[in-house]
Structures are given as C-alpha cells and as structure tokens.
Image: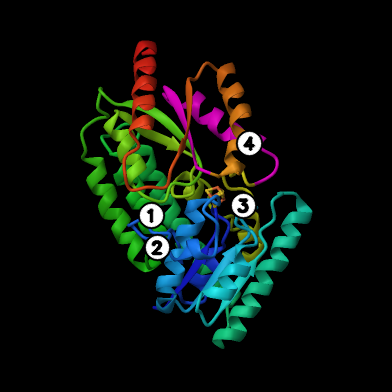
C-alpha cells in the first residue's frame, strides 16, 4: 500500500481520509538522529526544532511518499507550508485548515475543509472516496484507539516502561493500519502478564510540547518517574476519544477532531487544563511534569495557569524547557531528581 505523509503540530490531520483513500497515513516526526541541518537552511534556529526536524525528514525522504498534507496546528508552524511548497519535492502538497475553536461554526468550517481535501485527493489520484470507505476507515481507527486505551490503562497497574508506551503509540501513527491491530493485540497479551507497578517508581502525568523521540521518556525513567497519564499527541490525545458513528462519516470525523484532548494551540485553554486536573483527581498521580521544547511559546503561555490550577488541588508540578538533542541534559536531570525527592517526601 502506498504511503501518504502528513505534518501537524498536534493531532489535527484527519488520517481516516487517507485510510479511506487506500493509502497508509504516515505522521512525520523527524528522523531518529534528531537531524535538522537541511531544514536549518530555510527556518531560523530560534523556531521550534520539532518542526525543523519534520521538514528535515521531508527534504530527505519525500520521494518515499505519494504526497504530503499539512494541517494547521500551532501558529509557529502555520505558514511553514510556504517553505515546504518551495523546497520539498513531492507530487502533491496540500494544506488543510483545522479550526482552533470547537463551536458549531468551526465544525461546519471543518466539514467543508474535509470535503475539499477529499475532492483534491480524488482528482489527484483518480480515485473515489466513498462514504462506505470512510465508515470503514473510522472503524479501523476506532479499533486501534480502543486497543491503545486498554494498553494505556495497564500503565497504572503494571510494569510498563515509559519508552515502551511511547514506542507503541508512535508505531500506530507511522505504520500500515492493517498491521497495527495484530501488533497491538500481541503487546496487550504481553503487558497483561507483566509484574505489578514497581514500588520504586513514582506515577506522574506528563504534559506540554509533543515529544517525538523516546529519549525524554528514558530520562524520566532513569530518575524513577513513571508516566501513567499524559495528554500528548504520541499519547492519549491520539486515542482517548473515539470517533462518533451516529451521523454521516464526514461530520463524525469533523466532530472527533474538535473534541479530542486539547493542545495549547487551541482556544480556550480551560479544556486542556481540565483534562489534566481530572486525571490527577481520578488516578494516583503524585506529580505533574510539564515540559516544553525550546521556543514552543504556545505551551509556555499555559504554564502559569496550569501551575496555579494544580496548586489548588495540591498536586506538585515541575516545569522544564528542554533542548532538541540526542544527549541527556544533566541540568534537567538534576532538577527532576530534586522533584523526585519532593514527591518521595509527600508519599
Ligand atoms: S512543539 Fe510547539 S512550536 Fe513546535 S510544532 Fe509543536 S506546538 Fe508548534
């Protein structure tokens, strides 16, 4: 099956349209080596390195993909489409406007956007994307999300390392959907037999800029912080909500993308904070780690509000700004160790 790549700064791109078009949606997340050199020719280094790494991968690997779509995510990356249009070699480059609000007008607007993208794909690839195919794609997507929900719940009671969880979700956004169900079922059988949650690990909620490499999860693991809940794109934002099936598939898809756990890129902030507060109240969360990648101002703006709301419910929080690097940041490691000491005193 052919691969169609997409770039969004959160979980904005409706990948079900690509599944219905009989292609494999592939989320561009940058290469494992953290490279940005090629992209740095076109985007200044004071812009988010995540986005630069996505462009870098596209500059190197776009020939493997049938086409690329970019969805409106954060304002930092919004008009990077123009740079991609100039420099990335691809037979098809498409921009889909994903609304920042969630009201009825936004939903109507997004339905129109999805229909326009379907028309563009049909015309480019000489295919027909039927409502029946869209319904089947929703079913596939929901089946994957249900399995991910089951896996995610095991994090709280079983010994599942941070990077194992991250790698499973990452696999789901980059591999052919028909392979994923059996893959997830085998992981589920394995995780169910794991030992209980280790007593030396401290359960935390992880939030902030999207994490695209397992390294950061490994750093948390090293200092004994175990991520049992999160609201990240390679995480709960991808699977916490199912796509509704009560209306026509395009309306259902539009509704879904406007009702997933919110990112800081969306307005207003309250639903995002409420998701975190609810998780902290309902699970045995001992603390919150809020992190942003350097220059991700979108998430940085939310931090004072997040901290004040967590104070109200007496959940300790640490906020750190990280570099985009394959090296462990020792200063952050030391700060996390100090945070762990604080959490251990509260235990
Ligand atoms: S990390 Fe922040 S600045 Fe970078 S793409 Fe994501 S939301 Fe935008």
- Callout 3: CB less than 8 Å from ligand 1: yes
User: Where in the figure is residue 197, as x and y percent of width and height?
Assistant: 27, 29
User: Where in the figure is residue 257, as x and y percent of width and height?
Assistant: 60, 54
How far apart are the alpha carbons under marks 4 and 1?
A: 27 Å
How far apart are the alpha carbons under marks 1 and 2?
A: 7 Å
Task: Please tell me whether mark 1 or mark 3 is closer to you in this view.
Answer: 3
Residue under numbered circle 2:
174
Residue under numbered circle 4:
301
User: Where in the figure is residue 217, as x and y percent of width and height?
Assistant: 34, 40
Q: Residues within 10 Å of mark 4 (few under 14, many from 20)?
A: few
User: Where in the figure is residue 246, as x and y percent of width and height?
Assistant: 63, 57
Q: Which one is nearer the viewer's eye here, 301 or 275?
A: 301
Please, is residue 299 above or below residue 342 in the view? below
Tell whether position 18 is magenta. no
Residue under numbered circle 1:
170
Tell whether position 272 is magenta. yes
How far apart are the alpha carbons under marks 4 and 2?
A: 30 Å
Whether label 1 touches label 2, CB < 8 Å: yes
Of pointers 4 and 3, the one earlier in the residue sequence:
3
Task: Please tell me whether mark 3 or mark 2 is closer to you in this view.
Answer: 3
How far apart are the alpha carbons under marks 4 and 3?
A: 13 Å
How far apart are the alpha carbons under marks 3 and 2?
A: 21 Å
Magenta-colored span: 266-294
* Number of residue marks: 4
Q: Considering the numbered disc 2 on the image, is that residue within a helix, a strand or a loop? A: helix
Numbered circle sitting on residue 74 = 3
Of pointers 4 and 1, the one earlier in the residue sequence:
1
Q: Considering the numbered disc 3 on the image, is that residue within a helix, a strand or a loop? A: loop
């Amino acid at each position: 099956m052919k691969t169609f790549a997409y770039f969004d700064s959160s979980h904005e791109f409706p990948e079900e349209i690509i599944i219905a078009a009989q292609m494999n949606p592939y989320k561009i997340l940058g290469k494992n080596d953290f490279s940005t050199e090629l992209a740095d020719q076109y985007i200044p280094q004071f812009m988010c390195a995540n986005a630069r790494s996505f462009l870098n991968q596209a500059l190197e690997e776009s020939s493997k993909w049938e086409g690329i779509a970019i969805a409106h995510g954060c304002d930092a990356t919004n008009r990077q489409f123009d740079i991609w249009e100039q420099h990335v070699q691809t037979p098809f480059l498409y921009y889909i406007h994903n609304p920042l609000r969630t009201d009825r007008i936004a939903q109507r607007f997004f339905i129109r956007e999805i229909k326009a993208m379907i028309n563009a794909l049909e015309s480019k690839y000489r295919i027909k994307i039927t409502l029946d195919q869209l319904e089947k794609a929703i079913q596939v997507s929901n089946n994957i999300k249900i399995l991910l929900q089951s896996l995610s719940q095991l994090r709280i009671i079983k010994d599942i390392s941070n990077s194992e969880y991250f790698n499973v979700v990452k696999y789901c956004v980059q591999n052919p959907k028909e392979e994923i169900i059996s893959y997830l079922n085998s992981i589920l059988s394995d995780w169910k037999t794991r030992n209980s949650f280790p007593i030396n690990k401290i359960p935390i909620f992880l939030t902030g800029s999207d994490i695209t490499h397992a390294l950061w999860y490994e750093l948390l693991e090293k200092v004994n912080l175990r991520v049992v809940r999160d609201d990240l794109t390679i995480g709960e934002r991808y699977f916490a909500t199912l796509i509704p099936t009560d209306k026509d598939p395009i309306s259902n898809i539009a509704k879904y993308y406007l009702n997933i756990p919110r990112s800081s890129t969306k307005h207003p902030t309250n639903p995002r904070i409420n998701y975190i507060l609810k998780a902290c109240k309902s699970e045995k969360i001992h603390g919150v780690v809020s992190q942003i990648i350097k220059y991700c101002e979108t998430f940085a703006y939310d931090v004072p509000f997040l901290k004040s709301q967590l104070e109200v419910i007496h959940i300790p929080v640490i906020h750190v700004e990280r570099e985009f690097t394959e090296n462990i940041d020792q200063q952050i490691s030391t700060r996390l160790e100090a945070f762990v000491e604080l959490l251990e005193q509260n235990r």
